[in-house]
Amino acid sequence: MMFEKWVLTILLLQFCCVGCGFCGKVLVWPCEMSHWLNLKIILEELLQRGHEVTILTSSQTYFVDYHKPSAFNFEVISVSGNQEDAEKIINEFLHIAVNIMPTLSLWESAKLFQNYFLDLTEQFEELCRKAVYNESLIVKLRETKYDVMVIDPMVPCGELVAELLGIPFVNTIRLSMGNTMERYCGHLPVLPSYVPVSMGGLTDRMTFMERVKNMILILPYLPLKYYCIQLTNHYRIIASKIQVGPTTLCESLGKAEIWLIRTYWDFEFPRPYLPNFVFVGGLHCKPNVCLQEMEDFVQSSGEDGVVVFSLGSMVKNLTEEKANFIASALAQLPQKVVWRYKGKKPATLGANTRIFDWLPQNDLLGHPKTKAFVTHGGTNGIYEAVYHGIPMVGIPMFIDQPDNIAHMKAKGAAVEVNFNTMTSADLLSALRTVIYQPSYKENAMRLSRIHHDQPIKPLDRAVFWIEFVMRHKGAKHLRPASHDLTWFQYHSLDVIGFLLACVATVIFMVTKCCLFSCQKIGKTGKKKKRE
Amino acid sequence: MMFEKWVLTILLLQFCCVGCGFCGKVLVWPCEMSHWLNLKIILEELLQRGHEVTILTSSQTYFVDYHKPSAFNFEVISVSGNQEDAEKIINEFLHIAVNIMPTLSLWESAKLFQNYFLDLTEQFEELCRKAVYNESLIVKLRETKYDVMVIDPMVPCGELVAELLGIPFVNTIRLSMGNTMERYCGHLPVLPSYVPVSMGGLTDRMTFMERVKNMILILPYLPLKYYCIQLTNHYRIIASKIQVGPTTLCESLGKAEIWLIRTYWDFEFPRPYLPNFVFVGGLHCKPNVCLQEMEDFVQSSGEDGVVVFSLGSMVKNLTEEKANFIASALAQLPQKVVWRYKGKKPATLGANTRIFDWLPQNDLLGHPKTKAFVTHGGTNGIYEAVYHGIPMVGIPMFIDQPDNIAHMKAKGAAVEVNFNTMTSADLLSALRTVIYQPSYKENAMRLSRIHHDQPIKPLDRAVFWIEFVMRHKGAKHLRPASHDLTWFQYHSLDVIGFLLACVATVIFMVTKCCLFSCQKIGKTGKKKKRE
């Protein structure tokens, strides 16, 4: 393994001079799941361009393969739980979100989530303490002289490590719940009249009542606010102990040089943004390659083509009932169906449907026979469909999925089906709509054309700005001065107050003068009358 | 000439297949002076890439050389005045701005400008009428089937022509006075707390009183508002006569697919912007080439180097007094000075200073011996200095010049000297500061590094988006939905009103209920007491 790594390093160092003319050291603070899958593409490109990439990961991770030989370096932070514990927490979340939440009232759901977030916060806090209190680790990282940190802020603390090491950092996120993180921490302006709050399921063209809803949602997003307060308390304690400047999560995150956003204008509604926000959605997408063993099955679909069905890597099993009516809906299609599913084979499974543990999703979506994509609406999957111009049926469940599908619906490239209430007929009708109504394919192709027609590819854009931060030790010329204002200065409340006071004073003075003059005239008049 | 043009066309058509894979037809509505010099670079690149470029110009133009052989096509709109009249108007403007305005009160200046703008509006109106009422011209343009129009909105009416022809258009501007045009017509959001009003001379880091000033300036910018109203009146009449949709200049301009802004973040303060705003500042800059006849003089400067002095192509003569004390300041420098000046040779001219009718400004600024640039602060000149990393002494006079210099001052790359009050000592001291205080050179070099380190060159970016509009017949995916809202919807005034009414109703109901309950309890208490 050591020899392989050494050969690889030599090769990369040689490439470096050809690539960017600058070989830097990148430290990464990752998150799990689809976030990691997306970030990994950037990191592999950074490796390709000759940079040294070190991943600072929790020992509990079950996505970052630090045990296997890799061109990445790893610094592992030992925490108390193991990978199974982490998986248990995720499965618990899935169970709550998919099976329990739909049966509860809003209030009960909120309480359940609150408890879940408290657990999560404790985990994050442990990871943070184990990272920043570990002097030998910090000394080692400091001595390595990293040029930049790439941080997924969904797991807090990376920015505290960057602060401790005194290096600039880049955030990588999909716009967050209620736009909270990028609005409060990144100062991204939100205009409630046409910028829908992320996760609110609204579009940029709202009716009056939708704009009222958006305005209410845009006020501090309560569940997330609660979560942030919790985090902030932990933050204060940790930050004060390690003696770094800011004491709130938002202040720390706001120091990011660049925010890499995992979407682009093929997906987003046009909205105001800032020069340090770079939209790099779909950076993981690539042309399809040959399907190999699935090719025969796909080819057998003839003129009717193929439907690709996947609810993502997180949802592995469905209830038997649900699996059955999904299967029966799919059985009624003339298309062939490839279905990613790990549960028990449904009794109603049609001859046209094949179940697979795993799908080469990108290659399937790029196949000329593919007619539609049934998806839970994860950002990565949505972008693969956009890249290949495939219309979608969205069955969103949680986090950003309903919002992602709302975007695709608004752009005319998807039909939504409610996961909790759907019937066989609903799914079948949605599938028929996107397959046989030409507008869906046309819109998906339009988005695809927009996606492919950018002045520079999303992956190159992401890598360019990370390298820029390395070359220039930051990107301060893109950072708005708003970060140095208090919230009331930012909203010009002091100026408005002052101007109103001035106007009030003038009105008061003029009124007083008028009254005084009137009285004077009145008195003179009376005097004259008396005379 | 015809033969030359034919050969050129054949060559370009051959290149086309290599270049962008799409040969389009571009119609251009230009403005004069530095605007044209900048736009011409884009148009030449479009020609290079195989597109057909037709310039729709007034017969009065004195910058667009439609008489000479050219690879551009021209459609000339005959207006009553000739080139000399146009030059007279410009010279009148210069005379007012440079010599008369400084001696007048603010009120007198405003009146003078108002009269000048009224003359200008009449000229614009004539040009507009001669363009859009000319049926044979419109039919000819319509039949040519242009793919896109590139418009300099400083001369209104191009957008009406685009509307008549039914083709998408791209605006090209440097952010306008008070941000009026891009704010009202392009819906660029302006946050008064850290976005200084363009032309206000403020920066993004303002004191409380500066923020008050900015808030006041951000309110409808009066002189420009007046000008717009004048234009709008003419607009209404013309637009209704040719039966095209919008009746105000702003509505028409707001239909632009892309706004090409002639600055970038090396110049601008970081601020919110929209996805259909593309910053392409410095697109005209290029590496310097050998100086030829000036080289010996420049080389003779030795270690001390050279100062480049130019107040732009518009200001040709200065008063004898001003020219004399400028010359005497320059004479005291150990540097050699190349001075662009057309007036009488000043008596105080030093042996170190040479006067030229015209300067190869870009090549001089790129020369390794050049130490400083004395400039009036035109955007093109500023960008040449930024490109080559040369610190500046700014002597701004009018329009965007004071604002341009304010930007460079805030970035630490320039010192400002007041044109009206300056003495020899002021100019000398400013020059010594930028030459001998290393921070000025360092900051100029920092801006230069930022300018050169962009993911794609400004000229390529400008051409990419014009070509994008041609390929996709627009760029609607970048256009904010705010354009379909009324001003009170845009500012959410209806929603805020509704929510306040709801809150007021609730408070009213609760108060009423409380009062009613209190009365009830009170009565019951009294009754009980009586019993």
Image (cartoon, coloured by chain):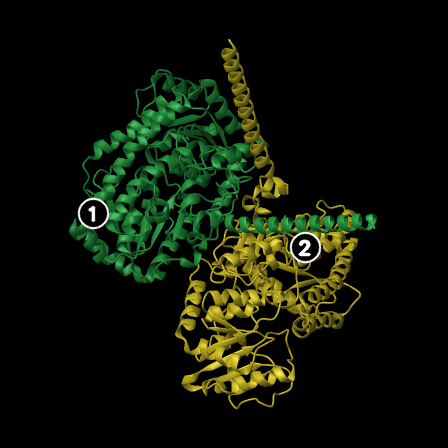
Chain colours: A green, B yellow
B153 on left or right of B60: left
Examine the image and state in which quarter residue A79 appears.
top left
Q: Is residue B330 above or below residue A223?
A: below
Q: Nearer the viewer, residue B286 or B502?
A: B502
User: What's the chain of the residue with tag 1?
Assistant: A
Asked whether B308 or A122 is in front, the reply is: A122
> How far is mark 1 from mark 2, CA to CA?
60 Å
Mark 2, secondary structure of its residue = helix
Q: Label 1 amino acid?
A: Tyr
Helix, strand or loop for disc 1? loop
Q: Position of residue A49 (x, y in %)?
A: 32, 56
Quarter assignment of residue B488: top right
Chain under label 2? B
Q: Which residue is mark 2?
A: B225
Q: Residues within 10 Å of mark 1 (few under 14, many from 20)?
A: few
Q: In terms of depth relative to the viewer, which is nearer, B259 or A519?
A: A519
Classify B212 as above or below B102.
above
The image shows residue A456 at horizontal and vertical percentages of 45, 53
Most extreme residue toward the front is: A531
Tell me the number on the disc at residue A133.
1
Residue under the image location 44 percent in, 37 percent down: A220
Image spot of residue B270 (x, y percent): 47, 56
| Label 2 Cα crowd, 10 Å radius (few <14 / some 14-19 / many 20+) | few
Residue B271 numbered mark, or none: none
Going 62% across and 54% down the picture, which residue do you hit?
B181
Question: In the image, what residue type sits under mark 2?
Answer: Lys
